[in-house]
Amino acid sequence: MIRNLLFDWSGTLADDLPSVLRAVNGMLGAAGQAALTLEEFKSRFRLPYTEFFEEMLPGVSLERLQQLYLEHFPHAHEGVTLLPHAAEFIRYSAASGRRMVVLSSAPTEHVEAQARALGVRDAFEIMRCGVIDKRSEILTLLADLDMRAEDTAFIGDMRHDIEAGKAAGVLTVATCTGYESAGALLTAGPDLLVTDLSRLPLLLGRHAEQVNSIPVSTVGALILNKADEMLLIRTHKWSHRWGIPGGKIKRGETCEDALVREITEETGLALRDIEFVMVQDCIEPPEFQRSAHFLLLNYIARCADEGPRVVLNEEAQEFLWLPLAEALQIELNIPTRVLIDECVRRGLVS
């Protein structure tokens, strides 16, 4: 069952080919070389893009290539549109509860600006961009996001995308909407080949797939600083509501070891005075991004440092330190509100 969707961006979701061609021809012109026609570019361009530029501009460093590309690319989202059926497929995927991530070679600043301008940024959990070789990066991405290969599909428009998907053991879907032809894509042996994204809902199933597995055990902590303010983070995973940091317990870890690791990874904070508070049954939480059944092991703890500096990883978008009264006024996810109420009842916070 496919629960996770990895997308290439250029040629898969967004039509940025005219802007990319303009940037490449600007780079070639600056080096005194003739411009490429669209057909010449499509026949010669390939990923990793370092191989293409080694042929076209030999001896130019990667840093300089990236600098030149940004100099010659038009305004980040100027002229870039969503490809036909991309918006509908994004809406379908979100409604079916699937996690969505972008894995792209395009510069981060371009993809982020284009996604925001096109109104689709919030659909994606993260955007891992500026990737030179997706064949290695995809493995890191799956590990970072705790995505199982058998639950994941990678959708792209180039042979390199298919090769990356195969390297990770995920379902590979080639779409003929971008930089390479159907004939070229078939040489990479994709699991599925589609003319565009309009047929994918039928192939992936029209309804959200239910997860028939044992509950997932997780740990999380209500963290207090020296001023007795509590740390709250906001994440796509919980419909942009505020909650506590935490995550899954790995095999072989104690609960407290898992808590310390997760808090360090997600916030950069060290903990002291860790105290267990409660277990929550969290079955099909309506705010969570997909179908799920969690056992939430909730703790309360204090920062080990006097002046704690929060460093969020890519799982969260914002953080706040708030006193109790203000925390109760913001849009908390349900499990966090339950935990805070229990801490108040037991006199652990005031």
Image (cartoon, helix red, strand yellow):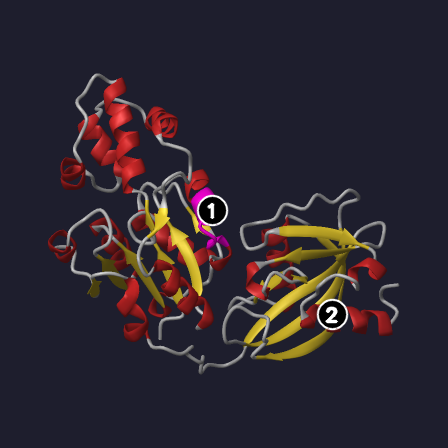
Quarter of the image for residue 25 reads: top left
Which numbered disc, 2 or 1, marks the residue closer to the eye? 1
Residue 276 located within the stretch drawn in magenta: no
Residue 150 is left or right of residue 281, and the answer is left
- Numbered disc total: 2
Give percent across and percent down for residue 244. 68, 61
Quarter of the image for residue 280 reads: bottom right
Residue 119 located within the stretch drawn in magenta: yes
Q: Nearer the viewer, residue 227 or 102?
A: 102
Residue 57 is left or right of residue 303, and the answer is left
Give percent across and percent down for residue 196. 25, 61
Q: Residue at 34% across / 27% down in the picture?
A: 72
Q: CA distance from mark 2 to mark 1?
A: 34 Å
Give percent across and percent down for residue 201. 32, 71
Residue linked to disc 1: 117
Q: Residue at 79% across / 64% down in the picture?
A: 328
Residue 84 is left or right of residue 261, and the answer is left
Q: Which residues are drawn in magenta?
A: 113-121
Secondary element type, mark 1:
helix
Residue linked to disc 2: 337
| Looking at the image, residue 28 lies above or below residue 183 | above
Q: Residues within 10 Å of mark 2 (few under 14, many from 20)?
A: some
The N terminus: image quadrant: bottom left
**Which amino acid does the dot numbered 2 rest on?**
Arg
Q: If you read the primary sequence from the N terminus, does the residue marked by circle 2 or circle 1 appear first?
A: 1
**Which amino acid does the dot numbered 1 rest on?**
Ala
Q: Main secondary structure of the magenta part?
A: helix
Q: Nearer the viewer, residue 216 or 285?
A: 285
| Looking at the image, residue 179 lies above or below residue 315 | above
Secondary element type, mark 2:
helix
